[in-house]
Image (cartoon, rainbow, N blue to C red):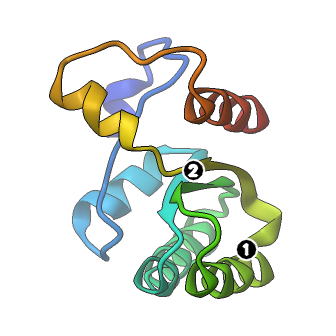
């Protein structure tokens, strides 16, 4: 994959993979320098981080490579005690990588279902924009 993309001048290539130890994830990690991890603040999501961190550490050691890692909390629902506990664990383990938080919004589903364009006034839009600025 590296050889095939070297002749092009891309600003960004987005590769969306599942958080599982498979060939696609390893190939994606081989050709990237930046990793953006959207995470729902749920226990299972946090527990699956070990898969990604172990794989990235292995590739970093083999290829002598350093990744720029960013985490975005996605679909966050405030005022839920269980989510706060999970978020505390997330910050304790990965706080230096967290670049933003996007709260859950029912209006996103409405926009998708009705093929509407999102409003720039929506809170989630500003949160996503701020997270993107923190990453870039």
Between residue 32 and residue 52, name the one nearer to us: 52
Contact? badges 1 and 2 (CB < 8 Å): no
Quarter of the picture containing the C terminus is top right
**Which residue lies at the image location 63% right of the left edge and 84% below the top edge?**
81
- 43 lies left or right of 109: right
Can you tell which of label 1 and label 2 is closer to the viewer?
2
Query: x and y percent of residue 35 in the render?
Result: 56, 51
**Which one is nearer the viewer's eye here, 28 or 93?**
93
Give the residue at x 57% y 50%.
103
**Residue 77 found in image quarter:** bottom right
Residue 10 screen position, x and y as percent: 49, 16
Specify whether 132 is left or right of 105. right
Residue farthest along the front direction in this orientation: 79
| Image x and y of residue 26, in percent | 36, 63
Residue 135 position (above or below residue 126): below
Above or below: residue 8 compared with residue 43:
above
Rounded to the nearest angstrom, the CA distance separating label 1 from label 2 is: 19 Å
The residue under label 2 is 103
For marks 1 and 2, the one nearer the N-term is 1
Residue 15 relative to residue 65: left or right: left
Question: Considering the image in quadrants, where does the N terminus appear?
Answer: top left
Q: Provide the residue designation for mark 1.
A: 94
> Looking at the picture, does residue 116 appear above or below residue 99?
above
- Mark 2 is surrounded, within 10 Å at the Cα level, by few (under 14), some (14 to 19) or many (20 or more) other residues, namely some
Label 2 residue SS:
strand
Whether 46 is drawn above or below 14: the answer is below
10 Å neighbourhood of mark 1: few (<14), some, or many (≥20)? some
Q: Residue at x 38, y 51 (%)?
A: 28
Would residue 103 appear left or right of 52 to someone viewing this image?
Answer: right
Rendered residue at 41%/84% (across/down): 44
Where's residue 116, x and y in %? 27, 15
Q: What is the number of the mark on residue 1? A: none
């Amino acid at each position: 994959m590296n050889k095939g993309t070297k002749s092009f001048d891309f600003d960004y290539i987005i590769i969306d993979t599942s958080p599982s130890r498979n060939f696609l994830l390893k190939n994606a990690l081989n050709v990237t320098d930046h990793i953006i991890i959207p995470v729902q603040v749920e226990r299972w999501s946090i527990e699956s981080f070990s898969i990604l961190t172990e794989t990235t550490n292995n590739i970093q050691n083999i290829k002598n490579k350093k990744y720029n890692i960013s985490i975005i909390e996605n679909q966050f629902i405030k005022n839920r005690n269980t989510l706060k506990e999970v978020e505390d664990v997330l910050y304790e383990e990965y706080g230096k990588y967290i670049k933003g938080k996007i709260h859950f919004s029912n209006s996103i589903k409405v926009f998708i279902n009705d093929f509407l364009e999102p409003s720039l006034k929506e809170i989630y839009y500003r949160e996503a924009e701020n997270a993107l600025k923190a990453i870039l």
